[in-house]
Image (spheres, grey):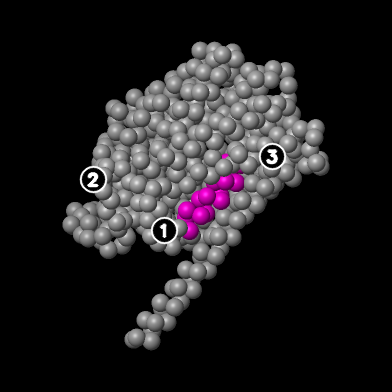
Amino acid sequence: MKDLVGLGHLFVVAFLFHFSSFMVLPAITDVTMEAVCPGRDECSVAIYLSGFQNAITGLGALVVTPIVGNLSDKYGRKALMTLPVTVAILPLFILACNRSEVYFYAYYVMKILAGIFCEGSIHCLLLAYVADHVGTKRRAAAFGLLSGVSAAGFLSGTLTARFLATSSTFQVAAAVGAAGAIYLRAFVPDSGAAVSFHDDACDPLLQDSSCSSAASSSASSDEELSPRLPPYKGVLPSPSDMVALLTGSLTLSTAAMITFFYSLGEHGLQTALLYYLKAQFGYSKDEFANLMLIAGAAGMISQLTVMPIFAPIVGEEMLLIVGLLGGCTHVFLYGIAWSYWVPYFAAAFIILSAFVHPSIRTNVSKSVGSNEQGIAQGCISGISSFASILAPLIFTPLTAWFLSETTPFNFKGFSIMVAGFCTLTAFVISIRMRAARCGVSEKVSLVQHEQA
């Protein structure tokens, strides 16, 4: 029961953090354009500033996230989670005061610094906390619930922003972010490898009364089912330790490749989409908010209802394939949008693509030991951050080129189509991974049959 209460408090923190973070997204494009290129609908400088911010943030997160994850394995999740939750408030507070050009550039610098500590760290630590308290059989559903709560925060924040003035949006976001930090320190119990929870009989999501009788065997089963990383010297892991982790099994190496290509396409889409929609269909704050509401509702429904039902039935591998197929579809639809309503229709496919990240994280979580959850999730977040470095370098100039008057041919969504092919590559890898595993399973079954 104590574990269930702890997860409930964690979900509240996740909701408040994502509420405050995503609440400002519908307004930030207009704020950026007004500060950098007032009175214009197309502005290459704004696109390049956004791309540079994403690249520097991703570079910093690539280094910081695995370190934060590893430190949480040693010193507990709550202590390390306090840093990103608190730092994320600062850039919101700046724009809550004023949105003039000077304040915007102060926000811009602070947002980069905050993103380095928040971009991947908070997600990594939330996942590790859940893995500490939920057994392996229900972990896919639990990760889906966490993603669903985050999507609910996204949806609620976007809906709130839809009815607020721009100035009020940043003020409310800063206040909610502060409330989330206070709630974390006041109510969330600490968690770490020392109090990890891995026996399915004691899973708080299952509410099984046999918890006490099964607790004695949990440590031994964890040792048998989860591969161990080579012990490393020193306080922090070296790059070779992280490489050893990611190449230690087929599951981890394949998860890393899928994460890279899917994140490259995802961050490429994020780099291009809002500026593309503004140039192509004249979208503004309200249209951006409507689009994000559809995306958030689809993700929330998927992760709170659909994924917990189907994950135990079909498994996270099949959900990953379905999610990647849905991701390809919705990105390609954005790229070829022929009318203002097509992006709204494309956003509905997030009900499938929302399966991707929880499925990947579940595979990773099941492939490492109880005291390696933080560093494992941190390494996967680092891979995603590395993709977020490359994405602006590739898609920012590509987007600016095809939205300019010097484009080689009239196809404003070309950069988004390129992002779609990155997602398609991840889909192909997932198909080949499943085929390879099926082949290995058949060979093992045949050998066991011959030996019998």
Give the image quarter of residue 292.
top right
Classify the position of the N terminus by image quarter. top left
Q: List x then y, in percent, for residue 101.
A: 60, 15
Q: Main secondary structure of the magenta part?
A: helix
Q: Is residue 284 above or below residue 381?
A: above
Give the percent coordinates (x, y) of residue 8. 35, 38
Q: Compared to 360, does 90 lie above or below? A: above
Q: Is residue 34 magenta?
A: no
For mark 2, give the secondary structure. helix
The residue under the point 56% across, 14% down is 102
Q: Does the stretch in magenta take in 255?
A: yes
Q: Which of marks 3 and 1 precedes in the sequence? A: 1
Alpha-carbon distance for marks 3 and 2? Answer: 48 Å
Residue that badge 2 annotates? 195
Q: Is residue 334 visible?
A: no
Disc ID at residue 135: none
- Per the image, the residue denoted by label 1 is 247
Q: Place residue 123 in its image quadrant.
A: top left
How far apart, in angstroms, are the residues tagged by discs 1 and 3?
A: 33 Å
Comparing marks 1 and 2, which lies closer to the viewer?
Answer: 1
Q: Tell me: 79 left or right of 308.
A: left
State left or right for residue 450 relative to residue 349. Answer: left
What amino acid type should be assigned to the residue bearing mark 1?
Answer: Thr
Q: Residue at x 26, y 48 (%)?
A: 233
Q: Which residue is mark 3?
A: 398
Q: Residue at 48% of width from left, 23% of height from top?
A: 110
As shown in the figure, which amino acid type bears the numbered disc 3? Leu
Disc 3 or disc 2, which is closer to the eye? 3
Closer to the chain start, of discs 1 and 2, is 2
Point out the stretch of residues depicted in magenta. Answer: 254-269
Of helix, strand and loop, which one carries label 1? loop
Task: Give the class, few, some or many, for how many residues have Cα within 10 Å of label 1's Cα (few <14, many ≥20).
Answer: some
